[in-house]
Amino acid sequence: MPLRYHPFPLVCLLFAGCQASPDKAIRSDPTQPVAGLAASAIAADMASRFAEQAGLATAPISLARDKSEYSIALRGALNGWGYKVIDDGRVSHGKDAAKPVHLVFSLMNINGQVLARLSTDTLVLGRAYSVKPDGATPASPLTLMTRN
């Protein structure tokens, strides 16, 4: 019986090196294009998992603006979960304005699957997806890493 390699160990290695300083601005990684229903499906799933882990929206989400379908779908999905999404670098004004949470997203093609990642200073979520013309389905369990 031939051995079949699974991308999960590679995914774990990729996340093992992910660290960010809370004092530095975080920028979104370049994304691989994922379009249409697949972009919407991945964005909806990742936003729901982010909401489960991050909790109620108490601060705006600062997200780099790009024109990819995934970026647009992710903004909409986060709005649907009650998060106010602002452009990266925009400052909230007023004495009661909460400090924005910088959110980084990336998509990478690995072994015929798409690895989606969302990360903040304290939380990193990742999941692999099988992409088809009619959408995308999770191909791995959710990977979660929290930072102090």
Image: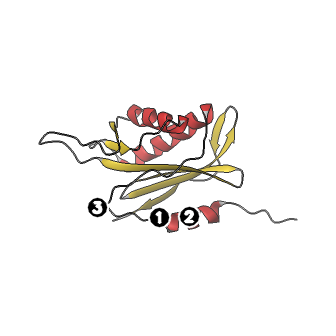
- How dense is the environment of label 1, judged by Cα within 10 Å: few (below 14), some, or many (20 and up)? few
Q: Position of residue 128 (x, y in %)?
A: 61, 51
Q: Residue at x 51, y 37 (%)?
A: 44
Q: Residue at x 67, y 50 (%)?
A: 113
**Relative vertical location of residue 107 with respect to residue 136 in this rendering, above or below:** below
Q: Position of residue 110 (x, y in %)?
A: 66, 55
Q: Nearer the viewer, residue 2 or 90?
A: 90
Q: Position of residue 2 (x, y in %)?
A: 86, 65
Mark whose residue sits in front, 3 or 1: 3
Q: Residue at x 70, y 33 (%)?
A: 133
The quadrant in which the N terminus is found is: bottom right
Q: Which residue is mark 1?
A: 18
Task: Indicate the amino acid at tag 3.
Answer: Asp
Q: Which residue is mark 2?
A: 14
Q: Secondary structure at mark 1?
A: loop
Task: Indicate the amino acid at tag 1.
Answer: Cys
The quadrant in which the C terminus is found is: bottom left
The answer to whether the residue labelled 1 contacts the one labelled 2, judged by CB atoms less than 8 Å apart, is: yes
